[in-house]
Structures are given as C-alpha cells and as structure tokens.
C-alpha cells in the first residue's frame, strides 16, 4: 500500500500537494448531461535525475459510475484512443496514459480518497522513458458537483437538481448556488455535506466495472 498523498512513477515517489489538487464532478450538455469527473493532482517540485520534476496527473471529462451514496467506489478502464477522455501525466510535457484504473471512495464532506494506477510515458532519459507504472494514493479536496444550467430554464435550481439526482442522492449536498462563469454560462454549484459512512472505508468493497 502506498503512503497517503503520494504519486509513484516507476521507482520514484513524489509528495502530492493536496492544497493545489482537486476533484470535482461536472454535468453539462457538452457531454450529453452525463456526470463526468475532473481530477488534478499536483506534486511538490523536486530535483531528480538532473532536472526539476513537478508531476501533474490529470483526468478530465472522465465518466465514473459511482454508487448513489458514493460509498462503494468506481473503477474506470480506458483506452488512449478514446477522444472524449483527457487523462495522462505531465512532467516535461503531456502524454496520455493507458490502462487507467481509478477508484474513488467517499470519506467525508471535504475529501474523496483516490487510488489510481496507469501506464505512463515520461521520456526523460533511458530509465525514465516510456511504459512506466504510475500509482497514486491520495485524499483530495472535493470541490462538489457543477451543473451547467440551461439558459432557457425557468427554474434553474429545479433544473440542476433534476439532473444531479439522476446520478447521486441530493441529500449528499448543500445548495445549489447559481453562479455565472467567465464564458457567460450559469452554473449550479452543489457543495458536499458531511458524509457519514455506514462502515469504515477499509470494509467497503469497490466494485470493478467490466471492460466493454
């Protein structure tokens, strides 16, 4: 088991900067109103193999099938040629990752626990080159769920709640607050409440979604 808030590339362990990292859910018509997730993990900078490393693991617009109470968890296995996924690692430049397996577990209203394994490319030198194992174990601040609101909706709160409750129980959240984005869209932001698990995280099974 990895130490908490660490990201490992091959045999090198980096500390994740939890304050800079985040995870949030998004529901928008850009993705057929499905619930997708954006994860950004930033590591603290460190001198390694002749240069400054500051790995950034990212997964944007990623669909994860979570239980309605976010207690079980979720697994995603993706292929690099899926154009809808932005998932990979940035060290000196961005490279997509493959063989991704992500598991998300709710701990409380502030943090989600994330376990992630993938095959990544770094292309730094002859040792840290391509097809390397990346592994992550972290507790990341949960920014909540953002629902992009239809501008023509008369009751924007009801519109947002209607879409959110298709995926997750509304009693997990506070709000929403209706905000305006820099693009002019209106976004309903649902912040998580303090979640109480029926059993401790180590006793919760995280089911695997079968490959299609």
Image (spheres, rainbow, N blue to C red):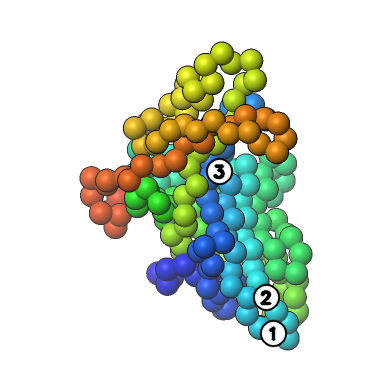
- 55 or 182: which is nearer to us? 182
Distance CA(mark 2)–CA(mark 3): 26 Å
Q: Which percent across, then down, holds residue 52?
A: 70, 79
Q: Are marks 1 and 2 in contact (CB under 8 Å)?
A: yes
Q: Which percent across, then down, holds residue 166?
A: 45, 25
Relative to 51, say whether 152 is above or below.
above
Residue hosting label 1? 49
Q: Secondary structure at mark 1?
A: loop
Mark 1 crowdedness (10 Å alpha carbons): few <14, some 14-19, many ≥20: few
- 182 or 86: which is nearer to us? 182
Residue hosting label 2? 53
Q: Secondary structure at mark 2?
A: strand
Q: Which percent across, then down, holds residue 7?
A: 54, 68
- Quarter occupied by the N terminus: bottom left
Q: Residue at 73% across / 82% down in the picture? A: 51
Q: Is residue 3 visible?
A: yes
Mark 2 crowdedness (10 Å alpha carbons): few <14, some 14-19, many ≥20: some
Residue hosting label 3? 37
Distance CA(mark 3)–CA(mark 1): 33 Å
Q: Is residue 32 visible?
A: no
- Quarter occupied by the C terminus: top right
Outermost residue toward the bottom in this view: 50
Relative to 113, say whether 92 is above or below.
below
């Amino acid at each position: 088991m990895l130490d908490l808030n660490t990201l490992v590339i091959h045999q090198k362990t980096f500390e994740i900067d939890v304050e800079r990292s985040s995870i949030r859910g998004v529901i928008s018509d850009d993705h057929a109103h499905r619930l997708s997730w954006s994860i950004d993990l930033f590591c603290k900078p460190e001198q390694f193999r002749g240069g400054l490393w500051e790995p950034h693991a990212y997964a944007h617009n990623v669909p994860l099938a979570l239980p309605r109470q976010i207690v079980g968890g979720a697994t995603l296995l993706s292929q690099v040629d899926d154009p809808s996924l932005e998932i990979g690692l940035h060290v000196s430049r961005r490279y997509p990752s493959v063989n991704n397996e992500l598991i998300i577990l709710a701990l409380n209203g502030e943090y989600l626990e994330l376990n992630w394994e993938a095959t990544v490319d770094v292309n730094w030198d002859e040792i840290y080159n391509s097809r390397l194992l990346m592994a992550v174990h972290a507790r990341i601040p949960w920014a909540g769920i953002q629902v992009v609101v239809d501008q023509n909706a008369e009751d924007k709160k009801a519109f947002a709640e209607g879409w959110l409750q298709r995926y997750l129980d509304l009693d997990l959240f506070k709000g929403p607050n209706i905000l305006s984005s820099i693009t002019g869209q209106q976004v309903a932001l649902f912040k998580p409440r303090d979640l109480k698990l029926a059993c401790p995280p180590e006793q919760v099974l995280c089911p695997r979604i079968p490959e299609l």
